[in-house]
Image: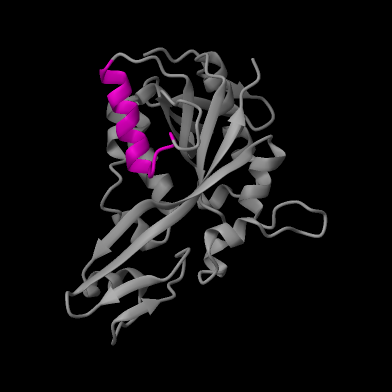
Amino acid sequence: MSDQTVPKKSRRLNAEVTTVECSPCLKDSLNAIRSQMWPAFLKHASDCRWKLLAEHFPGYQMLLVVDKHPVAVGHTVPLAWNQSIDGLPDSIEDTLLSAIGCYEAGKTANTLAVLGVFVSADCQGNGLSALMLKAVKQLANEQGFATMIVPVRPAFKSRYPLVSMNEYIAWKRSDGSPFDPTIRYHCKAGATVMKTAAKAMTVIGTVADWENWTEMRFAESGEYIVDGALKPVLIDLASDHGWYEDPFLWMHHFIET
């Protein structure tokens, strides 16, 4: 698998973009940085095997290194997408498995799917997200992909867990731009919203697991508002389980050639 985009340097930030293929010693940083950015319960998603990304697509797992320290990661996969909304994967796991199936079947990929861009907590606000977005777009361009799709987890949605995702993404600021900063960021970068989806990831655990992850007590069965969750978590004491499906929306970037 070719990896023509790296290493590259940003003179202003003295930063270098590399990949696991070029810098295998940095592979462990992928999980470390991603885990910083999520609420504890999302680290236990039952249906998202992130380790497969580095195993199957090392040239598409990007890292931003500043002064020899990884500070941001970008998880991407090459995908054969038919360009239809109905053809979009249902979850991150489905996206990954579709990419693996495409590769193993020898199909030609035409789209870069960006499963997530994560910036280390102590490096927020330094323009690194924009630098990573530029890098993944450049990867798409150099691999010959005309399109890029992103499963977006809106930054402020957890503040409004009782509002449906379809209602939430329709909210606008006074200037007409999207209310949510993550959606607004992608729109400013030229992306369009395609559709919402029910579950990027699924988290299932015992009641004790959920109490540990959330530092809450669940004395009755029912739906609970949990810090970091985009919608309520369902707790069932009779079966000793809690369920959560993390909703998201697909956004589409055209890649300039």
Nearest the eye: 29 or 228? 228
Which residue is situated farthest in the right direction here?
175
Question: What is the quadrant of residue 255 in the picture?
Answer: top right
| Rendered view: 187 above or below 46 | above
At x 54% / y 14%, what residue is drawn? 142
Is residue 124 shown left or right of residue 110? right
Q: Main secondary structure of the magenta part?
A: helix
Front residue of 39/172: it is 172
Q: Residue at x 45, y 37 (%)?
A: 86
Q: Is residue 123 left or right of residue 216?
A: right
Q: Which residues are magenta?
A: 87-105
Seen in the picture, residue 132 relative to 161 is either above or below; the reply is above
In the rendered structure, the answer to whether residue 181 lies left or right of residue 218 reads right
The x, y position of residue 179, in whole percent, is 69, 58
Q: Indicate the position of residue 39 as horizontal and vertical percent values.
A: 42, 61
Q: Give left or right: position of 243 versus 39.
A: left
Name which residue lies at 17% across and 80% down: 238
**From what the image shows, is residue 113 above or below residue 142?**
below
**In the rendering, at what x and y percent does residue 250 appear?**
52, 43
Q: Residue furthest left?
A: 239
The N terminus sits in image quarter: top left
Indicate whether residue 95 is drawn in magenta: yes
Toward the viewer: 159 or 102?
A: 102
9 vs 134, nearest the viewer: 134
Q: Quadrant of the C terminus?
A: top right
Is residue 84 at all visible to an observer of this figure? Answer: yes
